[in-house]
């Protein structure tokens, strides 16, 4: 009887551990383009004649399909601000809808913050799955999809007032950095 309880407990703990170690799945790919593995993003497509440094971009509002333990409107404000900051920091011009050469649009398929077992693990984690396209008129000149997970170590004890918001900002910043690295460096990586 004692061995049966121990075996059941061990099985439950093993299943919990495996559930926590599962990999992130990629969101659906944007329609109409064949993506390839990226150096910075999970997958991307770039038109052969696409020169990102010479264009002006309009960042259309992304949409959120699923948000778990996250205020999607607040997250989108942070996400859009981090994207705009990354574009400007890398010398890419942002413009209004009419003045822009290229429109950037996308979908956040899933954003999640988990603080399960926070008191034991001493960390919280965030997940982001996103896909999108850069279009010039009806043509897709760049497309991507990516999934990333970040964890943040914490001090034991009660939750800090804005630890989830700080993690979401860090997650948004990490995605923007990956997107801009792939966008600006894909030609160098392909030729080198």
Image: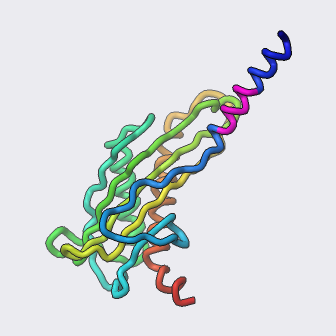
User: Residue at position x 77%, y 26% from top?
Assistant: 10
76 falls in the magenta region: no
Q: Is residue 179 above or below residue 162?
A: below
Give the quadrant of residue 48.
Answer: bottom left
38 and 157: which one is in front?
A: 38
Residue 56 visible: yes
User: Residue at position x 51%, y 47% from top?
Assistant: 127
- Residue 33, percent across and down? 34, 70
Q: Is residue 125 above or below residue 174?
A: above
- Residue 46, percent across and down? 39, 78
- Residue 39, percent across and down? 55, 72
- Left or right, 123 with respect to 49, comes to right
Secondary structure mostly taken by the magenta-highlighted segment of the chain: helix
14 falls in the magenta region: yes
50 and 4: which one is in front?
A: 4
Which residue, as the protein is rendered here, is positioned at the far left? Answer: 98
Residue stretch rendered in magenta on the structure: 11-18
62 and 74: which one is in front?
A: 62
């Amino acid at each position: 009887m004692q061995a049966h309880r121990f075996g059941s407990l061990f099985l439950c703990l093993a299943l919990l551990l495996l559930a926590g170690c599962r990999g992130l799945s990629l969101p659906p790919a944007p329609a109409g383009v064949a993506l390839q593995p990226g150096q910075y993003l999970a997958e991307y497509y770039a038109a052969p004649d696409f020169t990102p440094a010479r264009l002006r971009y309009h960042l259309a509002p992304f949409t959120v399909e699923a948000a778990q333990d996250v205020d999607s409107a607040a997250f989108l404000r942070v996400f859009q601000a981090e994207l705009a900051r990354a574009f400007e920091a890398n010398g890419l011009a942002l413009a209004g809808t009419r003045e822009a050469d290229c429109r950037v649009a996308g979908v956040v398929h899933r954003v999640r913050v988990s603080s399960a077992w926070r008191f034991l693990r001493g960390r919280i984690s965030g997940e982001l799955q996103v896909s999108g396209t850069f279009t010039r008129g009806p043509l897709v000149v760049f497309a991507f999809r990516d999934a990333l997970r970040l964890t943040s170590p914490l001090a034991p004890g009660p939750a800090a007032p804005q630890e989830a918001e700080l993690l979401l900002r860090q997650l948004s910043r990490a995605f923007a950095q990956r997107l801009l690295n792939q966008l600006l460096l894909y030609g160098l990586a392909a030729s080198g």
